[in-house]
Amino acid sequence: MEKAWWKESVIYQIYPRSFCDSNGDGVGDLNGIRSKLDYLQKLGINVIWLSPIYKSPNDDNGYDISDYQDIMDDFGTMEDFDALLKEAHEHGIKIVMDLVVNHTSDEHKWFVESRSSKDNPKRDYYIWREPKNGKEPNNWGSCFSGSAWEYDEKTNMYYLHCFSKKQPDLNWDNEKVRDEVFSMMDWWCKKGIDGFRMDVISMISKVPGLPDGNQSEGALYGDLSNTTNGPKVHDYLQEMRKQVLSKYDLITVGECAGVTIDEAKKYANLDGSELNMVFQFEHTSLDYENGGKWTTKRFNLPELKENLSKWQYELEGKAWNSLYWDNHDQPRIVSRLGDDSSLSAKCIATVLHMMKGTPYIYQGEELGMTNYPFRTIDDCRDIEILNAYKELVGGGYMTAEELMAGVRAKGRDNARTPMQWDKSHEAGFTTGTPWIKVNPNYTFINAKDELADEYSVFYFYQKLIGLRRKSEWSEVIVYGDYELLDKDDENVFSFTRSYGDRKLLVICNLSDRIIDYTLPLDVKEKACLISNYESSELSDEMFLRQWFAGVWEIE
Ligand code: TEU
C-alpha cells in the first residue's frame, strides 16, 4: 500500500468556542488555541481540525457562515489566524479547516441578494421552489426539526434548508456556485492551510425534481435520502479535485451522512480522484432507536464490532478509513460506551487507535471528559436540542423527562462544554462566564492534574499516539491488515494487525466485569506495547480485569 503522511497522522479536533478563552468574554478564541499549542505538541498529534472560525451569526455555532474569508468576531481577527497557522507549523502541527459549503448563513451576501428578487443574478445560487398546493414543495424534514422548506414572503417562494432555516442550501448544480466555492478554497490554500474537513459534503447534489423522501409511519416529515449521495456528487468532487485539491498537498476528509461502503469506495478511493477519507455514521447510529437519537439505549458490543470490522475489511486496499468515537456532534464515548472511569477511557481509546485508518481525537477525549448532567432545557444551547424540545415535547410526542434523558445520553452539547484545563475558576477555560456550563467534574478531571500523573488518560493517549507515529511498530499500526477475533464475544473486542511477518494482538475487555478469557490464538508474547494495567502478561488462560486493554507483538 502506498504510504502517505495523511495515513500516518493523528488528528485533534478543536471546537474553538469551547477550547480556551483568552479575553474573558466566555467564548473560546484563536489566541486561546495559540496558547495551548505546547499542550497539543506534548500530546503528540500532528494535525488540528478546526471547527468553523469564519464570520457567522452563530445560529449553529459557526456552521452557518456569512463570510468565508473573514473571522468570527468572537474568535479574533485574520491576523490572529495567520499567527496561529504560523505558530502551529512551528510546532510541527498542520491545520485543517472546516469547509461548510452545502449551505451558507442566510446572512451571507449571496443569500441576501438571492432572496431579494426572482430575477436577481444570484437567485439560482440557492434552491427556490414555488409552493405546491399552497404548501411546502415536498415532504422533506430538516435535520433540526420542522420542514426543510422556509416560505419567503418577499417573492412568495420557498427555499430549501436541510439544517436550520438560517442555513439555506446552496445550489451546486449552478456552475457559478461551484466556481465561487473553488476559488474561496484556493484562497485558503494559498494562505498555507493544510486541508479540509468537508461538512455534509455527501449532501451537495440533490436528486433532480426533488422527489419526496421516505416517510415512516408516525413520522412528521419525509427523510433527506434524496439529498444524500445524489447523482452528481462524485462529478462535483472530481471537479473540486481537479480545480483545487490537486494543486496542493492536502489532507481531505468528507463528512458523509448516509454513506455506504460502496459510496465510500468512491469518495475515498485510493486512486486519489476525490477525497482521502470519509466520516461514516453507521457505528454512531447503532445506539439509536427506530432511527431516533433521543434514547438512552446503549451499544451492543457484537453489533459494534461487526460494524467497525466491516469497514476495516471492505475498504482494505480500496479506500482509507477515518477512525473516530467523538466529535462536536456526538456524546462523549467514555460515557456512551464506557462508565465514565479513566480505565474505560483508556480501554476504548486502545480499540480505536489500534485499528487501521487515520484516528481523530476530539478535544477533552484525551482527558476522559464525560457527558454533562443536563437537568433542564435551560442548560442546553444546541439548536438541534432546542428545536427537538419544541417539536417533540411541545407537540406532546415525548415528556420533558424523556427528552432530557435522551439529551443526557446523546445530545450534542455533551461534547461542547468547556475544556477542563485545571481546578481554578470555570476549569481555567475563561476568567468570565462561559457560554455553556462547565462540567462539575472538572475538579477531578482536568488537564493540569493529568499532566502531573503519569498514569493519567492524557499520558495513555500520548503513548498510543507515539506508538502509531514514532515507534518500531508504526508500520504495523498504520499499514497492517486487520483481522477480528472472537466476533460473538459480548465483552471482549480483540483483533490482530499484520504487516509482513510482524503481528500485533489487541485485547480489550469492554465491560466492568472480570472475564475469564481463553486466548483465541496459539501464540507467544514478544513484547507488550501498552496496557492500562501494570501487569499484562499474555497467557493461554487469562483473567481480563475490568476495562482491561493490552497490545502485544506476538510470534
Ligand atoms: O453535521 C451534519 C450531520 O449530519 C450530523 O452529524 C448532525 O449534526 C447530527 O446528525 C445531528 O444529530 C454537520 C456538522 O458537523 C454539524 O455540527 C452541523 O450542525 C451540520 O453539519 C450543519 O452544518
Image: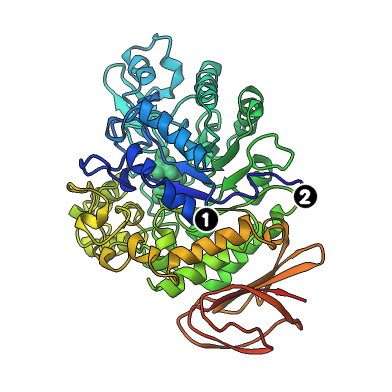
Relative to 356, is 364 on the left or the right? left
Q: Residue at x 55, y 39 (%)?
A: 202
Task: Residue 323: give x, y in percent of width and height.
Answer: 57, 55
Colouring chosen for the image of the structure: rainbow
Q: Nearer the viewer, residue 255 or 272?
A: 272
Decide: is 184 above or below 505. above
Decide: is 488 above or below 388. below
Q: Is mark 2 within 8 Å of ligand 1?
A: no
Q: Quadrant of residue 238?
A: top right
- What secondary structure is found at the residue carrying circle 2? loop
- What secondary structure is found at the residue carrying circle 1? loop
Task: Residue 198: give x, y in percent of width and height.
Answer: 51, 37
Decide: is 465 above or below 146. below
Mark 2 highlights which residue? 1
Image quarter of the C terminus? bottom right
Q: For the residue carrying disc 1, how many other residues have a C-alpha within 10 Å: few (<14), some (14-19), or many (20+)? A: many
Decide: is 438 above or below 21. below
Q: For the residue carrying disc 2, how many other residues have a C-alpha within 10 Å: few (<14), some (14-19), or many (20+)? A: few
In this orientation, does residue 150 appear? yes
> Residue lying farthest right?
501
Q: Residue at x 27, y 63 (%)?
A: 442
Of the numbered discs 2 and 1, the one sitting upstream in the chain is 2
Q: CA distance from mark 2 to mark 1?
A: 22 Å
Choose mark 2 or mark 1, whichever is in front.
2
In this orientation, does residue 215 appear? no
Mark 1 highlights which residue? 324
Q: Which amino acid lies under the numbered mark 2 shown in the image of this protein?
A: Met
Disc tally is 2
Q: Quadrant of residue 168?
A: top left
Q: Which amino acid lies under the numbered mark 1 shown in the image of this protein?
A: Tyr
